[in-house]
Amino acid sequence: MSSAADGTKRERSHRRSSDAACRNSRSPSEDNLEFDLATAPGHLIRRAQQVHTSVWATVVGEDLTSSQFAVLNVLYDKPGIDQTTLSQVASLDTSTCQDIVARLKKRGLVERLRDAADGRRWLLRLSVKGVQTRAMVVPKVKEVGELLLGSMSPQDRDDFSRLLFEVTRRSAEAPEI
């Protein structure tokens, strides 16, 4: 037997004895701590986000993230709002929102204007290019939703959206975690 094969054999043997030692070192109460990731809300939310990100990249592409689309959509609905309000409405932390606005501004999708009533304040709106980009992306975003929820009944879709909203609403109202 070669020394490489011999080393691999020793390594496997060591791993097996280490695994057995770990199993044997558990206390009786630890053996009763069953946990199924398939039913763990946090794990399922993380997995759902992974699926969404993958479908988004396939359908919408990588030029615009879902967070960037959220900013475009909020500014479409509420032109002339300040960045703090934008971050709240889009459910983004202020530093992330600031970064997204800077990127969208650099791409010519967002414009910053001085507030006529308060010269210290900046207001945001979509540029013409931003309005056009949003209009081109909306059908694709709807397609992402269809691909994610298409196999669900209309009632299940409503329930799913309502329950996700409830989770996000509760976390928004909860004290800092």
Image: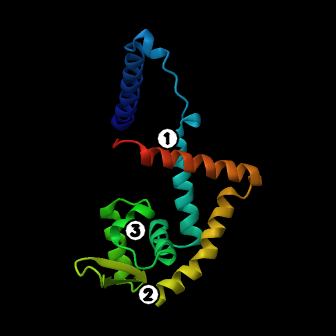
Q: Residue furthest bottom?
A: 128
Residue ID at (60%, 46%): 163
User: Separation of disc 2 and disc 1 at Cα?
Assistant: 38 Å
Q: Amino acid at mark 1?
A: Gly
Residue ID at (39%, 74%): 81
Confirm or deny contact between disc 1 and disc 3 (CB under 8 A).
no
Asked whether 122 or 147 is in front, the reply is: 122
Q: Compare marks 2 and 3 and give the one earlier in the sequence.
A: 3
Visible in this render: residue 135? yes
- Closest to the camera, between mark 1 and mark 3, is 3
Q: Residue 97: image x %, image y %?
A: 35, 66
Q: Residues within 10 Å of mark 3 (few under 14, many from 20)?
A: many
Residue bearing mark 3: 86
Residue bearing mark 2: 127
User: Separation of disc 1 and disc 3 at Cα?
Assistant: 27 Å
Q: Is residue 52 above or below residue 104?
A: above
Residue bearing mark 1: 42
- The number of discs equals 3
Q: Is residue 105 above or below residue 19?
A: below
Asked whether 83 or 42 is in front, the reply is: 83
